[in-house]
Image (cartoon, rainbow, N blue to C red):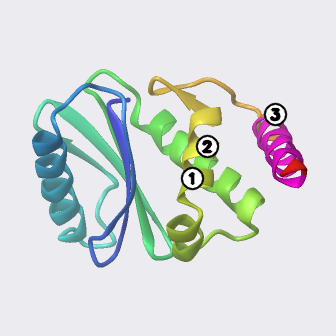
């Protein structure tokens, strides 16, 4: 996976994770171009598209679009499953995740993504193990805050 973007129906970027080195200018241009392209597509259209030399896989959940860029030879359905698994993890953690959860708890959304994906590859496929790691991190953070 090259990158993952989460953005609203209004085109506001809510989360971005890049697994390839790009300048800020390139990242902004890619984000802007992709958001415009995906938002312009009709709801019944396919969730896969060829863009530059990449495959874009996206899925809309409520008011958020989850968008991933993968290399041409990568499997789109596996990428769609990765997106769905990430949404399931967010749902389990936040209890039916919404856009506001991502906005106000973006560090947790990034942490969950980092527990699930490493370098653009799924590092842990078990939802239970990912959630357990997040729970342990939360407990550790609470214990540290409690000592201050």
Nearest to viewer (mark 1 / mark 3):
1
Disc number placed over residue 107 in the picture, else none: 1
Q: Is residue 28 magenta?
A: no
Nearest to viewer (mark 2 / mark 3):
2
Identify the residue position indicated by label 2 in the image. 111
**Furthest residue toward front:** 148
Circles 2 and 1: CB distance less than 8 Å? Answer: yes
Residue 117 drawn at (x, y percent): 55, 31
Secondary element type, mark 2:
helix
Residue 113 drawn at (x, y percent): 57, 42
Dot 1 crowding, Cα within 10 Å, few <14, some 14–19, many 20+: few
Dot 2 crowding, Cα within 10 Å, few <14, some 14–19, many 20+: some
Q: Disc 2 or 3, which lies upstream in sequence?
A: 2
Residue 62, placed above or below residue 46 = below
Circles 2 and 3: CB distance less than 8 Å? Answer: no
Secondary element type, mark 1:
helix
Q: Magenta stretch?
A: 130-146
Residue 64 drawn at (x, y percent): 44, 68
Residue drawn at x 54%, y 40% is 82
Dot 3 crowding, Cα within 10 Å, few <14, some 14–19, many 20+: few
Q: CA distance from mark 1 to mark 3?
A: 19 Å
């Amino acid at each position: 996976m090259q990158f993952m973007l989460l953005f609203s129906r209004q085109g506001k970027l809510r989360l971005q994770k890049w697994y390839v080195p790009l300048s800020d200018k390139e990242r902004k241009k890619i984000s802007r171009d992709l958001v415009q392209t995906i938002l312009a597509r009709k709801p019944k259209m396919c969730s896969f598209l060829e863009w530059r030399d990449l495959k874009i896989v996206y899925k809309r959940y409520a008011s958020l679009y989850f968008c991933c860029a993968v290399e041409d030879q990568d499997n789109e359905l596996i990428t769609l499953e990765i997106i769905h698994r990430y949404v399931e993890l967010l749902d389990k953690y936040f209890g039916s995740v919404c856009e506001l959860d991502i906005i106000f708890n973006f560090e947790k959304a990034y942490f969950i993504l980092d527990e699930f994906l490493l370098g653009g590859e799924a590092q842990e496929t078990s939802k239970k193990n990912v959630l357990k790691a997040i729970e342990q991190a939360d407990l550790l953070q609470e214990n540290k805050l409690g000592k201050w």
